[in-house]
Amino acid sequence: MGATIGALLANAVGVAISPVPVIAVILMLFSPSAARNASAFLVGWLLALSAVVGLVAALGGLGGSDGGRVVGDVVKIVVGVLFLLLALRQWRSRPAPGTEPEPPAWMASIDSFTAAKAVGFGALFAGANPKNLGLGVAAGTTIAASGLPAGQQVVVGAVYVVLASLTVVGPVVAYLVARERVSPALDRAKLWLVANNATVMVVLFTVLGAKVLGDGLGSLLAR
């Protein structure tokens, strides 16, 4: 079980380093319904991450050990290639030097979010975001191919979800525990993430794409 958790660490870190969801949760913490909406966002995030990993792991386990592992390797290769293409796309669409990136329209509407909408956005950023979805699929296939008993697979999946959620959970917990002290730091973090989102995503897509692609190719060629 420890080896499988170790194999998923890079995936979990890749999900955790997601500038846009962190920006979203920080903006919610500065909104009129801060605690309610940020907590709702977190619920949606956790549910979506768990659903993706759990569903992929369950489906992968239905293919038999050898067949499931081959499918898992192919999935990783596809995800790795997609990540590298997304890195190229992100690089080409990055803001010109010295220009301010244009914030998406949803940021201006966060103050009016209901709890239900916050849950939906949390699920969207966790489960429909290309990077997080790809990493979740790769994590699920790794769990399915591990050969672990079902109970241990659930534990491994839970560890992955917790580690992948630290950067979203952290601001919410810090705000609830020490609002006045952490607010300036959260505001600075938000400004830095908005300004450097494109650069962070290019690096992440490149590193994770190479890692996932290499894992899939290496495993497949070794058979």
Image: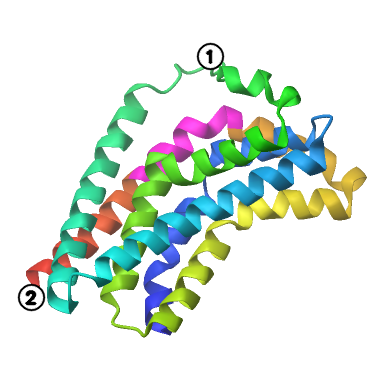
Q: Is residue 97 above or below residue 210?
A: above
- Label 1 sits on what residue type? Thr
Q: Is residue 185 visible?
A: no
Q: Is residue 58 above or below residue 203?
A: below
Q: Which residue is mark 1?
A: 99
The residue positioned 57% from the left and 37% from the top of the image is: 120
Total marks shown come to: 2
**Residue extent of the magenta highlight:** 194-205
- Image quadrant of residue 87? top left
Expressed as whole percent of the image width and height from the top left, the position of residue 25 reads 67, 40
- Image quadrant of residue 69? bottom left
**Residue 149 in the figure: left or right of residue 36:** left
Q: Which residue is mark 2?
A: 223
Secondary structure that dominates the magenta span: helix
Expressed as whole percent of the image width and height from the top left, the position of residue 201 reads 43, 38
Q: Is residue 188 above or below residue 48?
A: above
Query: What secondary structure is marked by label 1?
Result: loop
- Label 2 sits on what residue type? Arg
Looking at marks 2 and 1 on the same chain, the residue that comes earlier in the sequence is marked by 1
